[in-house]
Image: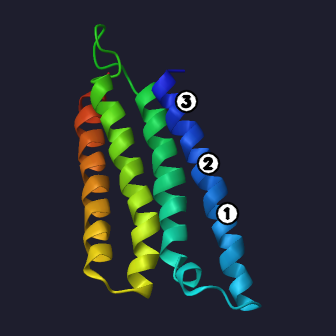
């Protein structure tokens, strides 16, 4: 298994654990008053789960298991795949911070950080598609 795939998979498992822990905390809101920042973290849970765990796990396995790009570059552009990993995770971590903060405080900074997080995740998606597209071919 390539090093980058192991990084994607291990990171996705950390996000799964974080998402499930946040789900537990959010469930406590039924019995306990949570701080406003935590109470506003519902959408953050979904992003941790879907982008952090599921999407990242898929990206890592696709990088490893899809058909070879060529004999010289079996996984396509490995540098691009590493950049995709970075963009996805920086974007997600920005979202984890800025989304609940924006819900609690409508300061412009939180809105800009939320927009930047979406841009980074979008760029990661475009980079992933660009690096994977040529590997989807007929036999």
- How much space separates mark 1 and mark 3, taking CA atoms? 21 Å
- How much space separates mark 2 and mark 3, taking CA atoms? 12 Å
- How much space separates mark 2 and mark 1, taking CA atoms? 10 Å
Say how many tags the image has. Answer: 3
Mark 1: few/some/many CA within 10 Å (<14, 14-19, 20+): some
x then y, percent, for residue 78: 32, 24
Q: Residue furthest right?
A: 31
Disc 1 designates what residue?
Answer: 20
Give the mark, 2 or 1, whose residue is nearer the N terminus.
Answer: 2
Q: Residue at x 33, y 46 (%)?
A: 87
Does 80 sit above or below residue 53?
above
Q: Are marks 2 and 1 in contact (CB under 8 Å)?
A: no
Task: Write down the quadrant of residue 33 in the picture.
Answer: bottom right
Is residue 42 in view from this perspective?
A: yes
Q: Quadrant of the C terminus?
A: top left
Q: Residue at x 77, y 91 (%)?
A: 31
Disc 2 designates what residue?
Answer: 14
Disc 3 designates what residue?
Answer: 6
- In front of the other: 134 or 130: 130
């Amino acid at each position: 298994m390539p090093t980058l795939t192991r990084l994607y998979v291990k990171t996705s498992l950390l996000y799964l654990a974080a998402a499930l822990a946040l789900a537990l905390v959010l469930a406590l809101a039924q019995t306990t008053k949570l701080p406003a920042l935590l109470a506003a973290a519902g959408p953050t849970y979904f992003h941790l789960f879907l982008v952090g765990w599921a999407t990242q796990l898929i990206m890592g396995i696709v990088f490893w298991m899809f058909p070879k790009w060529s004999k010289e570059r079996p996984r396509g552009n490995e540098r691009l795949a590493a950049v995709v990993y970075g963009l996805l995770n920086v974007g997600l971590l920005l979202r984890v911070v800025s989304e609940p903060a924006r819900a609690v405080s409508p300061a412009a900074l939180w809105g800009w950080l939320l927009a930047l997080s979406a841009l980074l995740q979008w760029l990661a998606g475009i980079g992933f598609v660009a690096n994977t597209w040529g590997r989807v071919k007929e036999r």
